[in-house]
């Protein structure tokens, strides 16, 4: 850098345009849900809801898993938005742990129960590759919206932030998928659906440094202070 | 900061002016081994980062934890960059300009036979000899040599050029 620090500070002040402070993480989550929920509902309506959906609403296991998936998505989104605010408590990173544990715990309990009731036949695993593209379809707009919103924050922990954002989008994507995709065997859900959610989360974490980095943000700031 | 977010450039300038020495102190305290210009680079990096994400400041929360979170993050980034750079560098005190092998250093010492060179210079006409002595052996500038000998700069240039040509011929012929 060649510019003297004091001169840079003065120049930054000169070119500073008014900015609207980012709302609190939970408010941003609510804003994200305003886009996410109608989109998921639209996809479910277009694909057409599963025939036994009304019956399923009285199936406690289905309801626990759906509520846990939804809560995982919402808490992961709140955590992701908190991680881009400097000075926010890092404990927010662990916000989705409890709903995720309930979700996985319910599925694990379902696997054990199937094993007890049906023996090894209860744990049969069939290929169901359709889960992967469908979860992507349901969560695509959610993930893009999330990415755009996260880029307004500070890239303090890029990988963790995008991983949480990916978990939020994929979690809600799986919630939507189970409204039209009749797959309820715990092991199948665990492997194909939760497996897809974790794969997408890992891919989002990998893309963290490309999506969120100081280099691009500082580059923009630096260009504004350069005298033409 | 709240005023700065609203577009009050005076308040923003005052804020940046106040925090710059604090940031400099922080960087110096955390990175004692850095040179002054590297410290300034890091301070500027933090200022640019703060500016880029000033929308993330929540006016209902204290300012210093927000600023320190950015500063610490940028310092950690700087340390990672430094480590990456250091991992790909080999520290050397003076880079060799050529290989040490004898084959690559045949002409590095000029004429090997100093006595022959002295003889050849003594054999030059007086004007050329004086020019060589002043400009090549005593390493005077053209202006100084011109003033000392009372000749013009142009005449000295010609004399040196001719003397060099004569010496080259004489020394190549001699061995």
Image (cartoon, coloured by chain):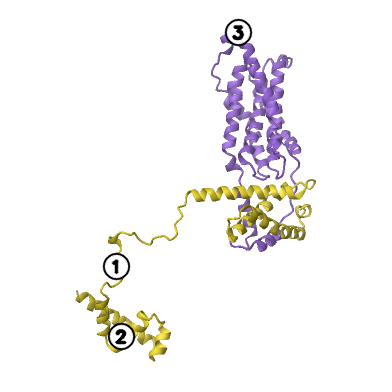
Chain colours: A purple, B yellow
Q: Which quarter of the figure is the N terminus of chain A placed in?
A: bottom right
Residue beneath label 2, please?
B129
Task: Check if mark 3 and mark 1 are on a common chain.
Answer: no
Which residue occupies the foreground of this view, B54 or A134?
B54
- Residue that protrudes farthest toward the top in the picture: A118
Task: Rate crowding at label 2 as few (under 14), some (14 to 19) or many (20 or more) other CA atoms within 10 Å.
Answer: some
What's the distance in space between the residues labelled 3 and 1, CA to CA? 91 Å
Quarter of the view holding residue A175:
top right
Residue beneath label 1, please?
B107
Vertically, is B143 above or below A28? below
Vertically, is B40 above or below A46? below
Circle 3 SS class: helix
Query: What x and y, as percent, mark residue A87?
Result: 72, 44
Name the residue located 62 percent from the left edge and 50 percent from the top edge: B75
Name the residue located 76 percent from the left edge and 61 percent from the top edge: B10
Circle 1 SS class: loop
Point out which mark residue A118 bears. 3
Camera-side mark, 3 or 2: 2
Vertically, is A45 above or below B12? above
Query: What x and y, as percent, mark residue A156?
Result: 65, 44
Name the residue located 56 percent from the left edge and 9 percent from the top edge: A121
Q: Are marks 3 and 1 in contact (CB under 8 Å)?
A: no
Q: Is residue A77 left or right of residue A130?
A: right
Q: Which quarter of the figure is the C terminus of chain A placed in?
A: bottom right
Q: Please give the chain letter of the residue carrying mark 2.
A: B
What's the distance in space between the residues labelled 3 and 2, CA to CA? 112 Å
Q: Are marks 2 and 1 in contact (CB under 8 Å)?
A: no
Q: Please give the chain letter of the residue carrying mark 3.
A: A
Query: What x and y, as percent, mark residue A93?
Result: 68, 35
Which residue occupies the foreground of this view, B111 or A157?
B111
Please tell me which of labels 2 and 1 falls first in the chain: 1
């Amino acid at each position: 850098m060649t510019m003297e620090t004091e001169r840079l500070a003065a120049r930054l002040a000169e070119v500073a345009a008014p900015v609207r402070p980012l709302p609190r993480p939970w408010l941003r989550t609510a804003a994200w849900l305003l886009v996410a929920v109608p989109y998921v509902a639209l996809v479910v309506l277009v694909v057409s809801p599963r025939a036994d959906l009304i019956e399923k609403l009285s199936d406690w296991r289905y309801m626990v898993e759906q509520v846990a998936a939804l809560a995982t998505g919402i808490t992961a989104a709140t955590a992701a938005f908190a991680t881009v605010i400097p000075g926010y408590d890092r404990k927010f990173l662990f916000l989705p742990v409890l709903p995720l544990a309930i979700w996985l715990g319910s599925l694990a309990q379902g696997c054990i129960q199937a094993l007890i009731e049906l023996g090894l036949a209860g744990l049969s695993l069939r290929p169901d590759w359709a889960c992967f593209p469908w979860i992507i379809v349901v969560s695509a707009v959610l993930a893009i919206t999330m990415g755009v919103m996260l880029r307004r924050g500070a890239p303090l922990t890029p990988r963790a932030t995008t991983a949480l954002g990916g978990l939020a989008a994929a979690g809600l994507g799986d919630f939507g998928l189970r409204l039209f995709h009749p797959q309820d065997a715990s092991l199948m859900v665990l492997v194909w659906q939760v497996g897809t959610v974790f794969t997408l989360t890992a891919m989002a974490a990998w893309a963290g440094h490309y999506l969120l980095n100081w280099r691009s943000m500082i580059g923009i700031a630096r260009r504004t202070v350069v005298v033409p | 900061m709240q005023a700065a977010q609203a577009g009050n450039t005076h308040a923003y300038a005052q804020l940046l002016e106040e925090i710059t020495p604090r940031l400099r102190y922080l960087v110096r305290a955390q990175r004692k081994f850095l040179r002054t210009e590297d410290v300034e680079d890091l301070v500027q990096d933090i200022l640019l980062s703060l500016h880029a994400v000033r929308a993330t400041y929540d006016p209902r929360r204290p300012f210093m934890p927000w600023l320190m979170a950015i500063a610490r993050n940028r310092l950690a980034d700087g340390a990672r960059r430094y480590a990456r750079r250091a991992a790909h560098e080999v520290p050397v005190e003076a880079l060799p300009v050529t290989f040490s092998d004898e084959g690559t250093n045949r002409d590095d010492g000029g004429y090997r036979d100093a006595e022959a060179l002295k003889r050849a210079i003594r054999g030059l006409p007086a004007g050329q000899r004086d020019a060589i002595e002043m400009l090549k052996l005593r390493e005077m500038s053209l202006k100084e040599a011109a003033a000392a000998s009372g000749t013009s700069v142009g005449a000295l240039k010609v004399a040196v050029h001719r003397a060099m040509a004569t010496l080259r011929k004489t020394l190549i012929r001699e061995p």
